[in-house]
Amino acid sequence: MGVFSRLCAWIVIGGPILILLGGLSGILGGVIGSFLAFSAHLPSIPDLKAYRPKTVSTFFAEDGSVIGLFYRERRFPVPLSELPPQVIHAFLAAEDARFFSHTGIDVFGIMRAFAKNLSTGNYTQGGSTITQQVTRNFLLSKEKKISRKIREAILAFRLEKNLSKNEILELYLNEIYLGRSSYGIEAAAGTYFGKSAKELTVPEAAFIAGLVSNPSKHSSNVDSAMKRREFVLGQMLKHGFITAEEHRQASAEEPKFRENLPNPFERVPYFTEAVRKYIIEKYGENRLYNEGLQVWTTCDLNFQDKAQDALIAGVKAWEKRRGRPAGLVRRLKPAEARAFLQAEGPSVYKMGDIVQAVVITNHATAKNQSKRTADKIQRCTMGLPGGAQFSVDLESDLKYRVNDVLEFRVDETQGSVLSLKQEMLPPVQGAMVCIENHTGYVRSLVGGLQFERSSFNRALQAVRQPGSAFKPFIYAAALEWAGYSPQTLIVDEPIAVNLNQNGPPWMPMNSDGRFHGPMTFRQALAHSRNIIAVKLLMDVGMDQTIETARLMGISSPLHKNLSLALGASEVTPLELTSAYTVFPNMGVRMNPVMVKKVVDRFGRVLEDNTVTPLDVSARTIQDGLRELETGPDETDDVEVLQHTENEQNRASEQRPKERASIVESIIGEKISSDANMNMQRVLSPQTAFLMIGALRETCVSGTAAATGRLRRSDLAGKTGTTDDCTDAWFVGFNSQYTTGVWMGFDAKVPLGRNEYGGTAALPVWMNFMKQILAGKPSTGYLPPPGIVFFENIDREKSLQPDPALLMAAPDLIPGQAIKQVCPIDTMYAPASAQNEAFLYGASTPDQVYSLYPHSVRVLAPNGQTLGYAAYSTDQKGRLTIERDSMIAAHADPYDEVEQTIPESTFEGSGVFGQRQGSGATPQFLPQGWYQ
C-alpha cells in the first residue's frame, strides 16, 4: 500500500478516533471544570460528630413532673441505638432504600427523578439521598435548582468520607422537620401519637416517615398523610423490610392520634413564667430556647392546685357577699348600655377571644321579681358591641339585671356563627405565695385567677399597700432595738401629729373608730391598733424600722413618713411573705428560692440552690442552752450570746449591721457556712419568739381569731387592710410553711364596705392551710434563752415543743433596758391632772378615750407632746381639729385663759429620730398595769 493509501486510511480511521478523544477530553475537562467551579465556594464540612441539634429546655416540679417546655424547634434528640428497626426501615423505605449501599449519591434515584421531572415538566422529584438531605439541612439552602443539586452531591460524597452511615442516619432522624413544630422522630412521635419513638408500631412509623416529603401539607391533612402512609408501607414491603402479612395488618390498622398536644405550661403558668424570666435574665434566650437546659424548680404541684382552688373559692365568696350574680363584670347605666351596643365591635372573632355582652332582657324576671330565684338557670337576651344579639341560658343564684355586663369566651367559629361560653370568674383578682420556712423554697405561687386572661403576675409584680400586715416589722424593731417587751404598756388614744407648720395636723384613726386606752404591746398587735403602731414608729425611729424591714427581706421602696406605720408603702406579696418566714425561723432570713438546680444538655450543673434545711429542733435548742451554761468548746467557732444585763444594754444600742456577729444560741450550726449561703440572721431568736407569741395572739383573740376553726395551736399571722378596703391581706404561718394572700382589684378601687383582710383574704388562707396541714400535728416553737413565762412554767418543760407555751404570755427576763411603758406616754399629764380619775378607766371600750374630755394630744413626729386641742367628729366618724384651738403642753386645760402654742414650738418638729425614753413608771398609772 502506498503512502497515499496509508494516509487516507489514517484519515478515515484515525479522524473519528481523534474527534472522539477530543470530545471525551472536552467533556472530561468540562466535568472537571464544573466540579472545580462548584467546589470553589462550597462550605467546609463541619465537625458534625460534635454537632448538637437545637433542643427543648424542660422545667420540672418537685416531683419530677414537667411544668414547662421551651424551644424554637421542638426536638428531643435520641440515639440511633434506641430506635426500633421498624422506625429506621420506614424512613429508609420512604426516602433512601439503598442508603447503606451507595456512597452518598444514588445514581439510579437521580435517573428516576430526572425521568419523572422530564415527564411532568417540574421538579416534583428530587432524587436526594438521606446523606444529601443532611448536607442540605446543615450546609445549603433548599432552593430547587440544578446548581444546588450538584453542590449537594459533592458535599454528600465528602460527608460520607467523614461520618459513618449510622452517624449520618442519627443526624437525619433527629434533625428532619415533621410538621406541627416537631423536629426529629422523638418529638413527632409525641406530637402525633403521644408516645416515645421506641414505642411506635409499623403503621405509626410509616405515617411519620411519610410526612417528610411535605410536612406542612400532610400534617394538616389526614387523608393526604394516610395516602403517604400507604406508599411507605408499600415501599417497606417492596424492599423486604416487612412481610406481606405485616403489610396487610399495618394497612388495615386505624391510627389513634393524640387529640390535643398537652401544654405542661398550663399546669402552673404563673410559677413557670416566673422561672422562665429568671432563666432568660441569667442565661439568655438562646440557651433557654436552643440548648436544652434542665431546670428543677421548688414547685409542689399539690400545693399549687390547692392554692389556685382556694383563691378562686375566695373570690367567688366575695362575689356572693357583695350580692353579685356569677361572672358580673360591671353594671351600666341606661345611657352607658346604649353606648356599649352602638360601639363598633371586632371585625373578626377568633377562638379563645374574650368578648363582653350586656343583658338586654332577662326573661326570668317576668315570672319572679325577687332578687333570688329557685331555678338557677336564667334565659337572657344579650347584646354585643355593634348591636348583634343572642340568647343564652345563664346559671346563677342571683338574678341578672338589665344592663349587666358579662364576659364570654369564643369556643368555636363557623363563618359568622359564634359559639360562646360564659366566663364565670368575677373581676376581682388575687395572689398567693407559700414558702417552706426552713429552706426558703417557694412551694406554690399563684399570680392571678386565670393566666390566659392576664399574664400579669401579681405575686411578683404587683406592688400594693400592705396595711396592717406591715406592723409586725415595726413591732419587731421595737423589741429588737428599743427595749420593748410584750408586756410594755402603750396608750390607745386619739392623737394629732403636727407634720408641718402651715398644714393641719394629721390625725391617724383606728379602723373601728374607737380607742381602748392602755394596752399591752402584745394586745395592741393582736387587735391591730393604728395609734399604737404610730407611737411605736415614733419611738423606734424611721431608720431602725426601715432597716429591720430591709434585713427581713422587704426590698421595695419604703417612704420615711409616719404613714409607714399604717402600711402605706407598697410591697409585693412574695417579699412580704418571705419576710414573715423570719419569725418561725427564729430570726433567720431565708431568701425565697424557686429554682433548685439548672443543668445543661451535657449534664454540667450551672446552678445549684439546694439548701440544707434550717434546724430548729429540740436537740439544737438544748445544745445551745448547754453552751450557755458551760461555755463553747475551744474548737467551736460559733459565738454564743450571753444574756446579761450589760450585754442587753449594749445590744439595744447597736445597729443591725454592727450586730451581724451575734450568733445563734438556738441554731446548732453556723448559718453562714458554704452549704447554707441562703441563710442570714437578721433578728435575735428572742425577738422572733416573742413576735410569734404576739402574732399567735392575733389568731386567738385578735383580728384573725377565725383561724380557731382550724383547731390548731401553731398558727400565727397578721391581717392587713388599706383605706376604703382597697387591698385585703393575710400573711400567716406555722412552723413549716408561711403563706401570704392578697385580694383586690387591679385598678386600686375598693372591694366594698366591710371587706377587710380578715373577711376577704383570711378565709382563702384558712382554706389552703387546712388542706396542706391535714393530718399533720401542731408543732411548737421552742423558747430561746432569756424568755420567761408568767405562768411559772418550769425550765425543763419550757424545752418541750409545746405550742401552748405561746398562750402563756412569754416575756423577756426583766432588766433595766426593758420599757414598762412607752416613753411617748410617760409623764405627759400636767401635774393638776395626776390625781384626776384618769379617763382611761372608762367602763366601756366604745367610749372615745382622751386624757381630757373632747381634747386630743398633739405630738411632734418624734413623739414629743406639743399640747392639746379640741376635736370634733365628721360624718364619716373621723376626728378633726382646728390649729388655733391648740394649747401648750404646760398649760392646764381647765384654766379659763387658753394659752396657744408658740409657732416656734413647731419648728424642727418634722425631724425624725429615735427616742430613748426612760423606763420609769409614771405615777398616775394605776398599779398593776405594769406588773
Image (tube, grey):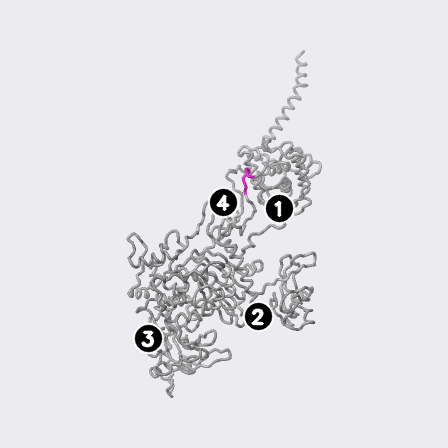
State the CA–CA distance, disc 3 to disc 2. 49 Å
- x, y (%) of residue 438? 42, 57
State the CA–CA distance, disc 4 to disc 3. 69 Å
State the CA–CA distance, disc 1 to disc 2. 48 Å
Q: Which of marks 4 and 2 is in front?
A: 2
- Left/right placement of residue 739 relative to residue 11 reads left
Q: Do the residues labelled 3 and 2 touch (CB within 8 Å)?
A: no
What's the residue type where badge 3 is placed?
Thr
The disc label shown at residue 322, or none: 2
The residue where tag 1 is placed is: 192
Give the answer, above or below, for where 353 lies relative to 97: below
Question: In which quadrant is the N terminus drawn?
Answer: top right
Magenta highlight range: 77-82
The residue where tag 4 is placed is: 601
The answer to which quarter of the image holds residue 165 is top right
Element under label 4? Answer: loop
Q: Nearer the viewer, residue 216 or 721?
A: 721
Give the answer, above or below, for where 169 lies relative to 341: above
- The answer to which of marks 4 and 2 sits earlier in the sequence is 2
